[in-house]
Image (cartoon, helix red, strand yellow):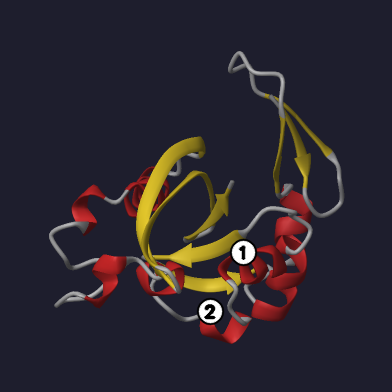
Amino acid sequence: MRRLCAWCKKDMGSVDNGEDIMTHGICEECEKLVEFEPVKTRKLIDEFDKPVLMNESGRCLVANTAASKALEKEIDSIEGYLGGDVICCVHASEPGGCGATEHCSGCTIRNTVTDTLKTGKSHLKVQAYQFIQTKNGTEKKEFFVSTEKKGNRVLLRID
């Protein structure tokens, strides 16, 4: 797997995992330039063409334009909210809310982000699904999530 910096496009080397794909991260030089300031961070993650959220303990701190479009929400309806509320998880409206229902312990998104936050281990294209509330009622949405730890935060990409 070849890695490029999403910001400056610098080659970040390869990781041999049997796949010949390209993925993105943030090189050390660019990471130093971007202390956590929402506007600067949003500009950085807007380089990704896939939806990307910067997460801290289940709460979305910053979202890119692709996430806003995919979720059909304005940025200010995403940033600062818990993940389940952002994606309209049907369980987020249950007593306790996102992160505190009996269903949350099995949430692939939450578990992947939490693992990356605790261990620092990145995850690539973890298969996930979520039952979300849409205009047409409850729908099962299937997708892949990838994570990467940056400081005490996690970048979450949705494919």
Secondary structure under badge 1? helix
Pointers 1 and 2 in contact (CB under 8 A)? no
Categorize mark 1 by other alpha carbons within 10 Å: few (<14), some (14-19), many (20+).
Answer: few
Residue 16 to residue 9: above or below: above
Q: Quadrant of the N terminus?
A: top right
Q: Closer to the camera: disc 1 or disc 2? A: 1
Residue 120 to residue 138: above or below: above
**Which residue does the numbered mark 2 point to in the structure image?**
79
Secondary structure under badge 2? loop
As drawn, the label of residue 70 is 1
Q: Name the residue type under label 1.
A: Ala
As drawn, the label of residue 54 is none
Give percent across and percent down for residue 133.
37, 69
Task: Please tell me which residue is depicted at 69% across the width and 63% down the height of the picture.
Answer: 66
Considering every residue shown, the one lying at the far front of the view is: 136
Q: Name the residue type under label 2.
A: Glu
Q: In which quarter of the image is residue 74?
A: bottom right
